Image: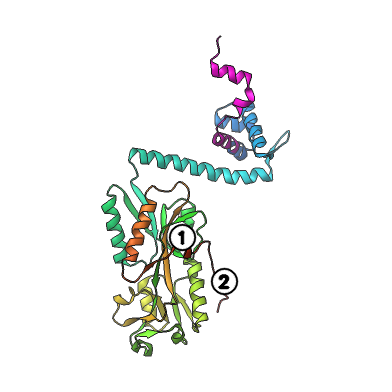
Amino acid sequence: MRLSKTSRRAHRYPNRYRRSVDPLRKLRYFLAVAEELHFGRAAERLGMAQPPLSQRIRELEKELGARLFDRGSRHVELTDAGRVLLTESRELLARWDRTRTLVGKAHRGEMDALRVGVPPELAGRVLAAIVTAFTGRHPEIRLDLQELSTAEQVRLLADRQLDAGLLQHPADVTGLELGPAIDTPLGVVLPRDSALAARAELTVADLAGQGLVIFPRAAAPGLYDQTLHTCRERGFRPTAIVHARNPEFVLGLVLSGQGVAFDQGAVAQKEPRVVWRRLRDNPLNRRMSLAWPSSAAHPVARELAELIGKVLRDDGVSTLVPAEDEVRPWHVVQLRRP
């Protein structure tokens, strides 16, 4: 039988052609053995004979310069290096599979949804402006918005259950790309019958003797710690800290005398019995930007980030943050509980 040119070369130079096996395929072979801890069962699961499977694993060990399995006469166990590769290979293969899926969908014009997390505090008019602007550009893509805290968004982004998230900084952005950051100065919300309401502008120190209504720390640990640190640095140590996420709940607590709250003004517009007052020198800011996974990102995530930056910047109050001032990596001030 006459061999083809490629077959003749493979027969003459077996090692060269053996090394040409797809590295991702070798990882899949490794993963099967690591999960089965039995070469025979792994070979059956992969639909191949055991000798070539063992050969591929030996090749992988040689390429990595580490033994991945301890092979006994009756058992197979992962080495420390093998356990590291097990974790990494699952992530690599999952990302590759997601990349193939995204590329295929984009090629077929099937990118029908973009899953995006937004903080509960985002004003309704801002949310509507974002949806309207995005739908105008991409009517074929459904914007699947989910109301989530920053901490929840970071977790879901890592698990690839979100395509993008509008994060409040500082936050852990490891493995994420960031769009334009927008700073919005915060004022203080207090009852209209408060003695402080008579002033047009306040300092943080003027709030001494008041309680503070703030979101739970678990929702955005970095922002929570930063806020309390700024308050204490500027002479405001709350007499009590009460937690609330829902804007209506915040209003109720402020009205009932539980404390003051920091907001950009939207909350106070809902209730005539409270007022919003500017804080001198803008000591407190809410910084937000859209984040998305660095690898296998949704094709329009970056475009959405630019759009959100424009919508937030156009409110007449917020400002675009220069790239060199962005919070990266995560800076969090750890505070002792009062």
**Residue at (55, 13) in percent of width and height:** 3
Which image quarter: residue 47? top right
Q: Is residue 313 depicted above or below 15 in this figure? A: below
Q: 35 or 172: which is nearer to us?
A: 172
Vertical comparison of 336 with 120: above or below: below
Query: On the rendered image, what quadrant is the C terminus found in?
Result: bottom right
The residue sitting at 41% across, 42% down in the picture is: 102
Q: Is residue 58 above or below residue 163?
A: above
Report the quarter where the N terminus lies.
top right
Q: Which residue is mark 1?
A: 152
Three-letter code for the amino acid on which mark 2 is drawn: Gln
Say which residue label 2 marks: 334
Taking the magenta stretch, the answer to whether it contains residue 125 is no
- Seen in the image, is 180 located left or right of residue 77? left
What element does badge 1 sit on?
Answer: helix
Instruction: Give the answer, above or below, for where 261 lies relative to 26.
Output: below
| Residue type of the residue flagged with mark 1 | Glu
Image mark count: 2
Where residue 152 sits: x, y (%)? 46, 60
Give the residues in magenta. 1-30
Query: Can you give x and y, in whole percent of width and height, for residue 282 in the image?
Result: 41, 77
Residue 49 seen by the camera = no
Task: Name the outermost residue toward the top.
Answer: 1
117 or 286: nearer the viewer? 286
Instruction: Name which residue lies at 41% across and 54% down.
Output: 164
- Distance, label 2 to label 1, CA atoms, is 20 Å
